[in-house]
Amino acid sequence: MNRSWLERHAYVLFLVPGLVLYGLFMVYPLGSSLGYSFFHWDGLVRGSFAGLENFRAVLTRSPYQERFWGALGHNALFFVSTLAIQSTVGLALAALFRKKWRGFGFFQTVYFVPYTLSMVVVGFLWLMLLNPTWGAFNQALRAVGLGGWVQPWLGQTETALPTIILVNAWRWLGFPVLVFLAGLQGIPDEFHEAATVDGATGWQAFRHVTLPLLAPVLGMMTILTFIWDFNAFELVFVMQGSSGNPYYATDLLGTLFYRTAFGDSTTGGEPGQIGIASAIAVLMLLLIGAVSYLGVRQMQKRQVEY
């Protein structure tokens, strides 16, 4: 009896290494951050119990209040802009690649390769390309007669965040192309043939047949993009540092958390505010978890079967 039970549950042994690693690197940091958020702590010695004081400081006390709401707004812009670019460009490229014209495999690889690169590598690459003095991007603008457009893209508050958003969208573009292509290939041809027989134009078939059937894919892309963009850190850290230069124009919740936890002379705060930084991390977790849950619920309600 005991041997039979062991044989039926032997798979648990194979799950143990994964569960240990997940608990060590995911569950424990999340749990400890939640605990730290209720204490005064300068990073060296944990102080007295603070209750909700750290959360109150983040949401209502200067300079954390201005930095938190500013970073939250940048994250929202980061998400909306990236989603718009990926949805339109990614879907257009996927529709183009679906026809499998000659040489489409080469272009499919070209658009997918950036997705395989590390975000740190992408950041350093574009940091060199956008160098205002010798960067290839400004040199290319001068070469094609657009010298008037040359400017320090990462050095101005007006252009720094849009530039990083475009770099981020370029890096992630391969993934939505792949997902949209799989979604398009999963739609039976009979649907488009029926629309053609009924006299629908190409746009009408896309608007009333393809797009509704792609709604689950679009919903999944929206949720994943939201989670990724509200966790964004590496790209901004590599290209602009933890201070969100210039003048917090590229500051995100991830860089604000890092700066608050480990200190930064430009924040106006004290170095090593682990308790307040943990409160920021908990607020990020609540925001991402709540929006993701609502998004999944909406997707389940509108699930399409064909």
Image (spheres, rainbow, N blue to C red):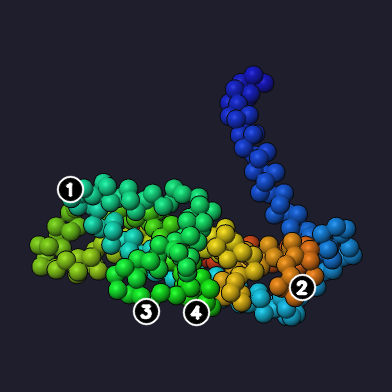
Residue under numbered circle 3: 148
Say what amino acid the circle numbered 1 marks: Arg
Q: Name the residue under label 2.
A: 269
Which residue is under mark 1? 102
Give the number of the mark in front: 1 or 3.
3
Q: How crowded is mark 2: few (under 14 residues within 10 Å), some or many (20 or more)?
A: some
Q: Answer with mark 2 or mark 3, whichever residue precedes in sequence.
A: 3
Mark closer to the chain start, 2 or 4: 4
- The mark that comes first in sequence, 1 or 3, is 1
- Residue 127 locus on image (x, y percent): 50, 61
Depth-wise, is mark 2 or mark 3 nearer the camera? 3
Residue visible at 59% across and 61% down in the picture: 237
Q: What residue type is labelled 2?
A: Gly
Q: How far apart are marks 3 and 4 (CA)?
A: 17 Å
Q: Name the kind of residue labelled 3 in the image.
A: Gly
Q: Check disc 1: other Cα within 10 Å, few if <14, some if 14-19, many if 20+.
A: few
Secondary structure of residue under mark 3? helix
* 13 to 220, vertically: above or below: above
Is residue 33 left or right of 168 when viewed as pictured? right
